[in-house]
Amino acid sequence: MKRTRYTFLIKNEHMKNIQIIPMKNNTTKTVFAGAVALALLFSGACQAPASTLKQSESFTDKNWQMKGLTIAPEIDWNLDGIPDTDIFPLLDACEQDDGFLFQRDNQFIRVFGDELCDEESSDEGGRWSYSDTDRKLTIIEGEDDIQEFKVLESSANRLILLYRFQSTDEQWHDMTAVYTLRP
């Protein structure tokens, strides 16, 4: 199955001159990666007491799969003229079954599911870091693809990440991705 990919130029608090412009493009990173990439992780299933457990220890070496992706306020995500809030159903099936594995050595692997799009291998990845102070997860793919997420929730079997971006109409949007442990 051929994956529909979207290019998004992002404008956030740090990059004042860049805007978000959704457009179909088969050579760019997938919406899933951006979200996941929002993305995209964390869990609280470690044996250490909660008082001594570092957040970064709670989400490593676990295989996460996105189960939900929403945006607020709404935006016409797929350019059909109808504003969308629930983005997950708009992703291709081959994107919905992909996941991430964050390793203790701060490397991550994008794990492709059974439904392959146009991926050539299952060993894509990059580096990640986490700041306990501000609950910020940073994912780095390649030389200049850096994405920052706020960890809203991290539990034994669920992770919720927030990604903020500004659309071309200068409106800020919150994209929320929900992950569960991969079966």
Image (spheres, rainbow, N blue to C red):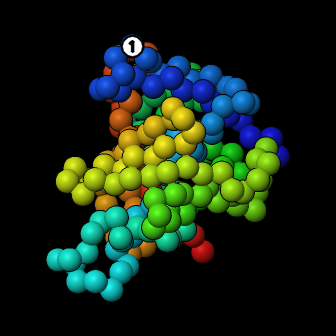
Q: Is residue 83 visible?
A: no
Most extreme residue toward the bottom, as rendered?
47
Identify the residue under disc 1: 17
Q: Position of residue 119 (x, y in %)?
A: 76, 47
Most extreme residue toward the right, as rendered?
1
Given residues 139 and 18, the one toward you in this image is: 139
Q: Position of residue 82 (x, y in %)?
A: 53, 27
> Is 94 placed above or below 156 here?
above
Q: Is residue 95 visible?
A: yes
State the residue at coordinates (43%, 17%). 18
> Is 42 placed above or below 170 here?
below
Res 151 quadrant in image: bottom left
Figure quadrant of the C terminus: bottom right
Given residues 144 and 183, the one toward you in this image is: 144
Q: SS at mark 1?
A: loop
> Is 11 placed above or below 51 here?
above
Q: Position of residue 88 (x, y in %)?
A: 55, 47
Most extreme residue toward the left, as rendered?
51
For the residue carrying disc 1, how many other residues have a C-alpha within 10 Å: few (<14), some (14-19), or many (20+)?
few
Given residues 29 and 174, the one toward you in this image is: 29
Given residues 138 and 8, the one toward you in this image is: 138
Label 1 sits on what residue type?
Answer: Asn
- Relative side of 179 to 114, left or right: left
- Relative side of 24 to 153, left or right: right
> Is 151 placed above or below 155 here?
above
State the residue at coordinates (60%, 27%). 7
State the residue at coordinates (31%, 25%). 14
State the residue at coordinates (74%, 40%). 3
